[in-house]
Structure formats: structure tokens, C-alpha cells
Amino acid sequence: MMPAEQPQSEPIDAGQLRRPRNPRREDRPWGSYEVLTRGPGFQVKRLSIKPDSRLSYQWHRHRAETWTVARGIAKVTINGEDQMLGPSQSIHVPRTHKHRIANPSSIEPLEIIEVQTGDYLGEDDIVREADDFGRA
């Protein structure tokens, strides 16, 4: 009796397991974002902020965010206090804290890696306090 042949399967790259099938890029007036990965209770985005642009001054009921500057210089506002961050610098924004990211450069785009954590990570969990594009 001959042993049955086992079907050959392709090895699976562990990194592919959590990556969305089609990374979701969304254009916004201030630039764009792309979801890099997500899982239970977390989501990671890459934010690209146009020169001289900024996101709305906002807060979230259900999530906290940690921002790391990948490229450029960021002007970060948290509860009315401004701070400048350069490449590889990070800051944590607790849930319910008002916050904003701005790109003060008139030439270079700003790239931010944003890690969201919380019990709900939907785009509708945004309470805008002020917005340069009339969305508040």
C-alpha cells in the first residue's frame, strides 16, 4: 500500500494575516489616511498631511490614539497645549482629550503613524470642536 500524497500548500506570511486585503485609503481635505492593519481593539493608520494643513480639533468617546512622526515636523495640540514633534517622536492622546495635528511646513508633507486603541474605532466616533473645512 502506498502512502497518500499530501497536498502541498504555500507558506503563509504571518504579516499577511492581519493586513486588510485592500488597504483602505481615504482622501480628506487635509490629505489622506490609509489603514495599515487592524485587530480586536486596535487599528493602525498612516496619515499623510498636506503642507500648511491640519486636521480638525476633535475628541473621541471610545478610543485613545498614539501618534509617531515618520516624516516631517508636526505641531500637535492636546487640550489647548501645543507641542512640536520631529521624526521618531511620539505622543499619546487619551480618550476624550481634544486634539489636533498640523503640518506647519509650506513645502513637505507630514507622515504620521497613528495607533488607535479602544472598544470602538469607527470613523463616526469623532466630535469636532473646530474645523478649517466647515465640518464642525
Image: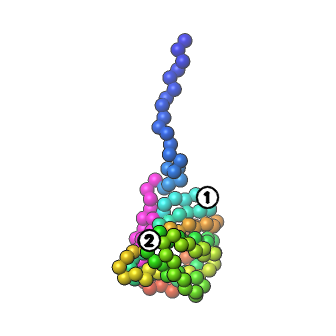
At label 1, which amino acid type do we have? Pro
Q: Is 60 left or right of 5, judged from the image as shown?
A: right
Amino acid on which disc 2 is placed: Arg
**Residue 40 — which label?**
1
Residue at 62% x, 80% y: name it: 97
> Badge 1, how many Cα within 10 Å: few under 14, some, many 20+?
few
Q: Going 55% across and 85% down the picture, which residue do you hit? A: 82
* Residue 55 drawn at (x, y percent): 47, 79
Q: Position of residue 66 (x, y in %)?
A: 58, 71
Picture disc at residue 71: 2
Dot 2 falls on a residue whose secondary structure is: strand
Residue 42 x %, y %: 59, 62
Horizontal side, residue 55 vs residue 121: left or right: left
Residue 79 lies in what quarter of the image?
Answer: bottom right
Q: In the rendered image of this protein, does residue 11 appear above or below residue 131?
A: above
> How is the protein colored in the picture?
rainbow
Q: Which residues are magenta?
A: 21-34
What secondary structure is marked by label 1?
loop
**Camera-side residue: 90 or 78?**
90
* Dot 2 alpha-carbon crowd within 10 angstroms: few under 14, some 14 to 19, many 20 or more: some
Residue 14 covered by magenta stretch? no
> Which residue lies at the image location 57% right of the left edge and 67% below the top edge?
116
In this view, the residue in front, 86 or 110, is 86
Tell me: 53 left or right of 96: left
The quadrant of the image that shows the N terminus is top right
| Front residue of this view, candidates 89 and 133 | 89
* Magenta highlight on residue 27: yes
Residue 112 seen in render: no
Q: CA distance from mark 1 to mark 2?
A: 28 Å
